[in-house]
Image (tube, rainbow, N blue to C red):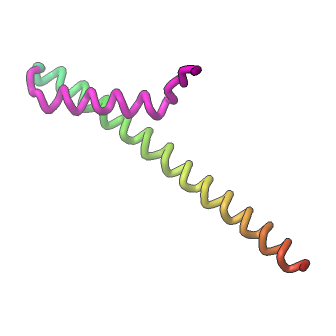
C-alpha cells in the first residue's frame, strides 16, 4: 500500500497540537511560550482562511451542479 503524504493542512494541525501541548505543560520560559503562542495564532488564522475558502468552493460547486441538474430536468 502506498503511503499518503500529509497535506499542508494536516501538518499545520499537527503543529498546532504540539503548540497547545507545549503551552499546557508550562515548562518553557515565558519568552519562548509567547513566541510559540504567536506561531500558533498565525497557524490558526491560516487554517481558518483555508477552511473558509474550502467552504466557499463547496458552496460554488453545489450551486453550479444544482443549476445544471435543474436545467437538465427541465428539458424532460
Residue at position x 85%, y 72% in the image:
72
* Magenta segment includes 3: yes
Instruction: From the image, give the main secondary structure of the stretch colored magenta.
Output: helix
Name the quarter where the C terminus is drawn.
Answer: bottom right
Of residues 22 and 4, the one drawn nearer to the viewer in this rendering: 4
Picture coordinates of residue 49, whole percent (x, y):
47, 45
Residue at position x 43%, y 40% in the image:
47
Q: Is residue 9 left or right of residue 22?
A: right
**Where is 71 relative to 52, above or below?**
below
**Where is 40 relative to 70, above or below?**
above
Q: Is residue 64 left or right of residue 59?
A: right
Of residues 42 and 23, the one drawn nearer to the viewer in this rendering: 23
Q: Quadrant of residue 58?
A: bottom right
Name the quarter where the N terminus is drawn.
Answer: top right
Q: Is residue 28 left or right of residue 66?
A: left
Residue at position x 38%, y 34% in the image:
13
Picture coordinates of residue 26, whole percent (x, y):
9, 27
Q: Which residues are magenta?
A: 1-27
**Where is 69 relative to 19, above or below?**
below
Amino acid at each position: 500500500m502506498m503511503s499518503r503524504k500529509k497535506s499542508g493542512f494536516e501538518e499545520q494541525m499537527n503543529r498546532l497540537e504540539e503548540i497547545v501541548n507545549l503551552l499546557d505543560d508550562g515548562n518553557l520560559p515565558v519568552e519562548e511560550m509567547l513566541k510559540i503562542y504567536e506561531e500558533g495564532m498565525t497557524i490558526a488564522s491560516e487554517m481558518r482562511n483555508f477552511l473558509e475558502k474550502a467552504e466557499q468552493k463547496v458552496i460554488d460547486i453545489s450551486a453550479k451542479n444544482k443549476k445544471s441538474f435543474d436545467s437538465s430536468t427541465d428539458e424532460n
